[in-house]
Image: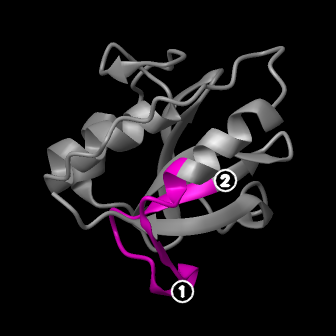
Amino acid sequence: MPPAWVAPYIGLPFAPGGRTREGLDCWGLCALVWSEQFGRDLPPYDGPAWVPGLPAGSVEAAATAYARRFSPVPLAEAEEGDGLLLRVLGAPIHAGLIVAPGWMLHIERGCDSVVERFDGPRWARRVVGCYRWRRN
């Protein structure tokens, strides 16, 4: 079950490239939570964000390169606050944040921020990797 601190992050609106509570994309949500809940300021992701009509592969290289700045963690050793890189449209272009074993907080086009199982039927086969940020 997700912890109580997650509640204020549920229902935040989606906005392409968004970095504030008024509108966030998947990376913006992760960065906001890492900053507010875990005191981890991250270097900004300045790669392209996926928008309809853009081939997912055009975002893949930037997202994968950015993920390399984090320490990979085996999914079996994932902790609250670790990030997930997920495959959407066949490419690793989506980010979520682990909030409890098997649960992630994420946001996507057409869906405000939500807590969802990452080990369930919709996402389990889409998990590319789990990552931890330790630098401050």
- Residue at point 46%, 74% (across, down): 101
Check residue 132 in the rendering and tell me which mark sits there, or answer none: none
Direction from residue 129 to residue 132 in the image, left or right: left
Q: Quadrant of residue 21?
A: top left
Residue 118, how many percent across, how many down?
A: 62, 61
Callout 2: 10 Å neighbours few (<14), some, many (20+)? Answer: many
Q: Are marks 1 and 2 in contact (CB under 8 Å)?
A: no
Residue to which mark 2 is pinned:
86
Quarter the N terminus occupies: bottom left
Q: Quadrant of residue 45?
A: top left
Query: What distance separates the C-alpha of mark 1 from that of mark 2?
Result: 16 Å
Residue at point 70% right, 18% down?
51
Span of residues in magenta: 66-85
Which residue is rendered at x = 40% and y = 31% of the image? 28
- Depth order, front residue of 55/69: 69
Q: Look at the picture and state if 82 lies above or below 32.
A: below
On the image, the x and y values in percent for residue 24 come to 43, 23
Residue 13 drawn in magenta: no
Q: Position of residue 33 (x, y in %)?
A: 28, 44
Amino acid of disc 2: Leu
Residue in front for this viewpoint, 98 or 48: 48
Q: Secondary structure at mark 2?
A: strand
Left of 4 or right of it: where is 90?
right
Residue 76 sits above or below residue 20 on the image: below
Residue 76 tag number: 1
